[in-house]
Amino acid sequence: MVNYIIRRLLIMPITIIGVTILIFGMLQFLSPVNRSALYVRDVPRNPNALDGIIKQYGLNDPIPVQYWHWLVGRPDPQTGQLVGGILRGDFGYSRSASEPVIELIKARFPATIELTIFAVIPIIVIGIWLGVVSAVNQNNPIDQFARIFSIIGYSFPTFVFGLLMLMLFYAVLRWFPPGRISDWANAVIRGPDWHNYTYLLTIDSLLNLRLDIFIDALRHLFLPVLTLSYVSWAQFLRVTRSSMLETLRQDYVVTARAKGLRERDVVNKHARPNALIPVATLGGLQMAFLLGGAVITETIFNFPGVGSAAAAAASQLDVVTVLSFTLLAGIILVLANLGVDVLYAFLDPRVRLG
Amino acid sequence: MAVAASGSPVPRAIEDVYEPHQPNWLEAALGPEWYRILRGVLTNPLSVIGLLLITMFVIVGLFAGAIAPPLNPADPYTIPRDGFGSTPKPPGSLWTLRQPPLPFWWQPVMHSTQWVHLMGTASGQWDIFYGVIWGARTALKVGVIIEGIALITGILVGSLSAFYGGWFDEILMRITDIFLAFPFILAALTLSAVLTPVLGKGIWPASIALIAFGWMSYARVIRGDILAVRERDFVTAARVIGAKDGRILFRHIIPNAIYPTLILGSLDIGVIVISFAALSFLGIGTEVGYADWGQLISFAQNWIPTLGTYWYIVVFPGVALILFVLGWNLVGDALRDIMDPRMRGRGA
């Protein structure tokens, strides 16, 4: 167990270095002029100035040199100050958003975090519940229904489901609007009396004692959360169901039944906690995926998180920006993978004690 | 023997007591494993529905030119448009400008020589019916190409990795981990944005991006199977008679390890087509007006407050996409149960 975690900890930096090399490799498809967005805000129109920038920032240097500068930054020949350097948090300029990429990330990340928090709860709780119900009723109509629900769920493209939800709940019924907040509420939170404590609207609105804004934020969260949940439930249902079926066949479950426990206790106290170990892995990874930005869902619902920012940058071919988001999501996922493996080891007595 | 002494009949040969399994012609032709898989798929109602859906899309894709004849046969993937107006037209509206040829079935069925927009038009007057029909061909085309190349890549990486083992294996598997470290859609989105200026708009940037981030699971699956096959006696025998590495790997090992990967891969076509459509929907990849379901659905983004009126922009291509993917997933679900060793002999 200790060896396993040590091995994982040793591999992790290698993976992260690999991730940065892959991202940097993709940057090499850009012309040196486009790569200058790593260091300067605007591309000058004048061809001489272009050459100047390429020289100034070493955009034609040998690739290992450029990689090093991309990682740690490069002294600006005029001012002597370091510019660029992803390790310093400087990802360059987002020409599609007209601001430094790091500012864009800071501005967009709270919305994604809020969406993740609200989506993860129904995804996991209802997903597990569906899986357990399905397994306990194996092969009878409830199970068949759950299976069909799940197959349809993972055949449903997120963007089609999201648009259908918008059609019904926004275009026709006007219950749940897209976006993150209504215009009137946006005016309030930009006003002088509003304090941003966490930048999570639901929490800040409660701390500012504005229940109306809290409700407005929830109304905007409802459809994206529903969409993310529906497409994820299928996966949770499958994993929980098969893990639960496996557990229900174990000897200790038979023993529990044999000693006369009620079926409810057998399922809830003996089988389910053990069956949930693989589900915990899935839950952790799901959360990391959402934190990396739910690209499609955020775009459809015009939800201003990192996912929709990445999609907007990509559709304008603003590569420096979209690569930064991908790098961020990749690193979140690598860390989450490690975290989940360690968690797995702690949850599973066979791994913990073995 | 004691049996003879007690006067009971002479024990019969084992073949007389246990009737040997007589394979029918199909089983004889396919071999027991494939026969079991085929029988499993054909006896499961859900997978039969799936097969029917796939067959339907293959037929529509093959005969797209007859079902919805192109305006310009040299460029059939560009959806014909009825003018340039921005307001979508509902299903059943008449074609007014630049009407493509009538399909063969229209006159006998409708007794009319006037071609209509069967499924309406999207903003820009792109004909949705044409896009849905030719979109089936696009879906099959990109599904098969992307999946085929991703499978070959994964199989090569996984088999070489398992076959040579050691440091080589370690390095290839770490590279696989790196590619797996990104969320699939975000990584594919990024790479297509990188490739679009290089390759120009079209199906290729998105296809290459989906291949680049889609081969890893096959590499992992076949690697596991090859590690098992590599230790078998017939491989040692091949080595003893002096066969070269390439021959051992491609003639002896891969053919014995490839089937689970191939089946897994072919069923991922549904997932690939969803992802391709998603990239198209996000505006990465194909030109506006390319006959692709994701592209068509993306027109709806401009009409979100009025989708109640313009529902047909989402619903027709959306249903086509869902049914296509559902078909592959229904078959895939059944196959996964059949191939799962734990489920063997449980009526599958």
Image: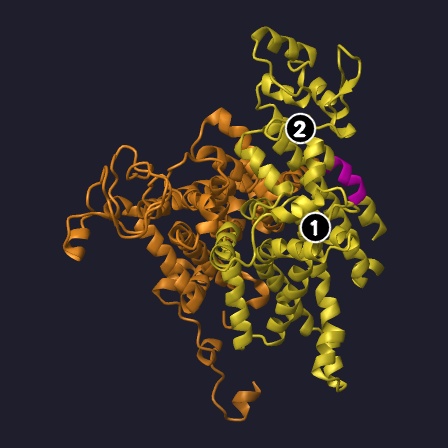
Chain colours: A yellow, B orange
Chain under callout 2: A
Give residue B314's position: percent from left, percent from top: 42, 51
User: Magenta span covers which residues?
Assistant: A8-15
Q: Position of residue B321 (x, y in %)?
A: 42, 52
Which kind of residue does numbered mark 2 sit on?
A: Glu
Dot 1 amino acid type: Glu
Magenta-colored stretch includes residue A10? yes
Choose between B95 and B171: the one closer to the eye.
Answer: B95
Is residue B140 shown above or below A80?
A: below
Subunit ID for the residue under disc 1: A
Q: How crowded is mark 2: few (under 14 residues within 10 Å), some or many (20 or more)?
A: few
Tell me how far mark 2 sits from mark 1, CA to CA.
Answer: 23 Å
Numbered-mark total: 2
Rendered residue at 34%/44% (across/down) = B131
Q: Where is residue B210 in the image (x, y as percent from the top left)?
A: 52, 40
Label 2 sits on residue: A99
Q: Can residue B230 be seen in this view?
A: no
Residue assigned mark 1: A114
Residue B35 lies in magenta, yes or no?
Answer: no
Classify residue B67 as left or right of residue A290: left
Q: In which quarter of the image is residue A35?
A: top right
